[in-house]
Amino acid sequence: MKHCLTIAGSDSCGGAGIQADLKTFSANGTYGMSVITAITAQNTQGVFDVQDVTPNVITRQIEAIFDDIRVDAVKIGMVSRPETIRAIVSTLKRYALPPLVVDPVMISKSGYDLLQPEAKKALIEELLPMATLITPNLPEAEVIVGYRIDSLEKMRRAAGDLHALGCSNVLVKGGHLEADAIDVLYDGEHFFELHSPRLHTRNTHGTGCTLSSAIAAYLAQDYPLKEAVEEAKAYITEAIEHGFALGQGVGPVHHFYALYRKAGLDV
């Protein structure tokens, strides 16, 4: 079995962050491990507080994993402070780095800032160039490139500009466009458009975390990049389609829908 590591924040209601990543790793046939960067107080209605983990403890978590267990892929999510980013970057550079997927988490669905303004520079200059793939949604990509992205043409432009920052591959997610859900993958030479029907549901908590973790799981299993993205997109589409109501706000996607169905459980 391949081993995947998520470096991200904890979601107390279990739909996003570390919890979503570990569910996704398991659902896609890999063993999941975690380094927690922050503890959030959140539920389906929003994020109410964040407590960052100290850089030293983040470093020690990474060391504990890499010094003992083979890591076949890494996914990085919420890294809210410059100190957090630098601790991760400096520690990972000491090891032979497997495929690295960076989901540049910046703002929660409820509008809570998950990336401090002063951390943007460290994210762009220090973390993104290490990535095998980055997976920004449109608002995140806009923050990084500095202009509005409201069309497929601008998504392609943004993918090129993000690649120029040093990222090996870029996946710009088009879920915030009003048309069909089209993502643009750019490998530095070719653009690929990945189409899927737009699903009209409010239960989409954890979609970005889940997609990036699924890509990492397939990269760990030696899928070529484009195929890994395609498999992950098919997985998240089904998870969104069968997302369920939880609490009083935005419910989570269904990470284990396919497995529950195969087991004959009521999904």
Image: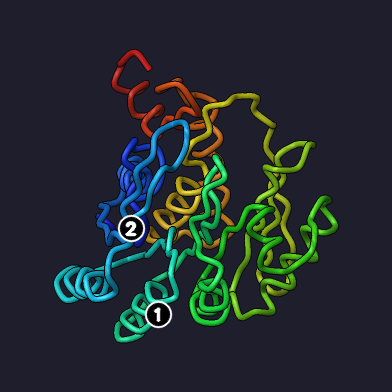
Tell me residue 212's x, y (percent).
48, 53
* Kind of residue sitting beneath label 1: Arg
Q: Where does the N terminus fall, quadrant-wise? A: bottom left
Q: Can you identify the residue that label 2 sits on?
A: 38
Residue at 49%, 39% (x, y): give it: 235
Query: Could you say where residue 70 lies in the image, as x and y percent from the top left?
Result: 23, 69
Please tell me which residue lies in front, 10 or 103: 10
Q: Nearer the viewer, residue 86 or 244?
A: 86
Q: Residues within 10 Å of mark 2 (few under 14, many from 20)?
A: many
Q: Is residue 84 above or below residue 249?
A: below
Q: Is residue 11 left or right of residue 62?
A: right
Residue 58 x, y percent position in the rendering? 27, 70
The residue identified by callout 1 is 86
Q: Is residue 199 left or right of residue 5?
A: right
Where is 184 relative to 122, above or below? above
Identity of the amino acid at label 2? Ala
Instruction: Say the numbered circle drawn on residue 37.
Output: none
Q: Earlier in the sequence, mark 1 or mark 2?
A: 2
Say how the picture is coloured.
rainbow
The quarter of the displayed image where residue 96 is located: bottom left
Quadrant position of residue 69: bottom left
Residue at 25 percent of width and 71 percent of height: 62
Of all residues shown, which one is farthest toward the left? 68
| Rendered-image quadrant of the C terminus | top left
